[in-house]
Structure formats: structure tokens, C-alpha cells
Amino acid sequence: MMYKKIEPHKELQPYIHFYWELKGNEVERQWERVFPDGCAGIVMNLGDVCLTDNGSTKMEFGKTYVVGAMTSFKDSFIDNNTHLIGVCLKPATFANFYRYTSQNELTNDTIEFEKANSFNVDKTIENSFNYFDQFYSERIMTKTNQLQTVINDIHSTNGQVRNFQEDILQQ
């Protein structure tokens, strides 16, 4: 299996963690486990039908899917004809790009996007990551993230945020 991550354009970095691409190979045909990270994602299938959500969802060639934030792991079957490409959004940034249902309703689900929200398959195949930069630069509706200060604090402490009450009591 080949997996790579690419950083988005610097103007998109406050909203997008990274772009990614996954290709299966003939040697490894297996269920691949994806663990929750609290982030919504967008996925396009450029290969054969791919089973995800522990086998309950089929992602078809050329279709774009929104994957809601997960509270539990998901398994996807990766074989030699698997070719997925996607976007890992930062927490609370989905609404910066999409007018869609509440993120709460998308939790733990993989839903096919309608055409208006989908990636163009030809442009994705031709030059995927540059196309994603253009796609999201044109779609951004608001440049705010209500959780950004909290996210920055968590990142600056490598997730080692202590309990505020403990800090007060120690003073």
C-alpha cells in the first residue's frame, strides 16, 4: 500500500490539515483500520469500488464522499485496485467550505456528496493536489474558526493541556 500526505497552500493551512492519497498494491489485500481524529474529511474514489465503514458503505469510482468526525475506528478494504484521494479538514472548519447538514448528523457516517459539492474527477486525476488548492480557495466562505485558539493551545502543548482547576489550586 502506498500512502502520501501533502500540505495545502499556506492560505488554506488554518482550515486543512493535509491532502492525502492511498493506492493499494497486489501484495497486500487487507482491511485497513482508520482511527478517529475528530476531523471531517472529503474522499474521492479513483479506483474500483471500495468498501468502508466496516463493510457497510461502498464508495464508487468518480464519486466524492464526506466522512464525518468519528467516535470509533472504521475499517476499509484495500486491494490492488484501490485508489482513494482526500482532504483532512481541521476541527470545526467544514462549514468554512460547505453549506451542508450539521456535522453532528454526519458523525461516524460516510455520505456521497451531490455533484455541486463534489470534486471534478478529470481535474482530480490530472493534477489532484493543485486542483484541491484551487477548489478550496474558491469555496472558502468565511475565514474564521471559532475553535482556533483552543486548537492552537492544544498543539502548542502537544496535547498536554492540564486541568485549569488544578493550576488554580496549586497557586
Image (tube, rainbow, N blue to C red):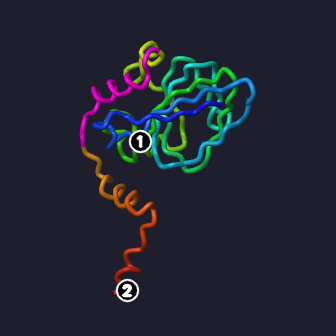
Query: Which residue sits at x=52%, y=17%?
Result: 62
44 left or right of 72 in image: left
Q: Is residue 73 above or below residue 58?
A: below
Q: Note whether 151 is above or below 44 in the view shown.
A: below
Residue neighbourhood size for the residue with mark 2, other residues' Cα within 10 Å, grouped as few (<14), some (14–19), many (≥20): few
The N terminus: image quadrant: top right
Task: Give the number of marks.
Answer: 2
Q: Is residue 158 above or below residue 131?
A: below
Image location of residue 75, percent across then percent down: 66, 39
SS assignment at label 2? helix
Task: Specify the quadrant of the image occupied by residue 97.
Answer: top left
Farthest residue, direction top: 122
Q: Magenta segment: does it hold 132?
A: yes
In the rendered image, which residue does mark 2 sit on?
A: 169
What segment carries the magenta color? Answer: 126-143
Residue nearer the viewer, 9 or 79: 9
Residue at 63% x, 33% y: name it.
Answer: 52
Which of pointers 2 and 1 lies earlier in the amino acid sequence?
Answer: 1
Q: What residue do we see at 43% from left, 18% from top?
A: 127
Instruction: Find residue 153 and report its horizontal and vertical position in percent.
Output: 35, 61
- In the rendering, which numbered label is found on residue 150? none
Q: Nearer the viewer, residue 13 or 100?
A: 13
Q: Amino acid at mark 2?
A: Leu
Q: Residues within 10 Å of mark 1 (few under 14, many from 20)?
A: some
Query: Residue 58 occupies which quadrant of the picture?
Result: top right
Q: Position of residue 150 (x, y in %)?
A: 34, 58
Check the picture and name the quadrant holding the C terminus. Answer: bottom left
Residue 121 at x, y = what percent?
46, 16
**Residue occupying the point 70% across, 36% down:** 31
Q: CA distance from mark 2 to mark 1?
A: 36 Å
Residue 17, label in figure: 1
Q: Amino acid at mark 1?
A: His
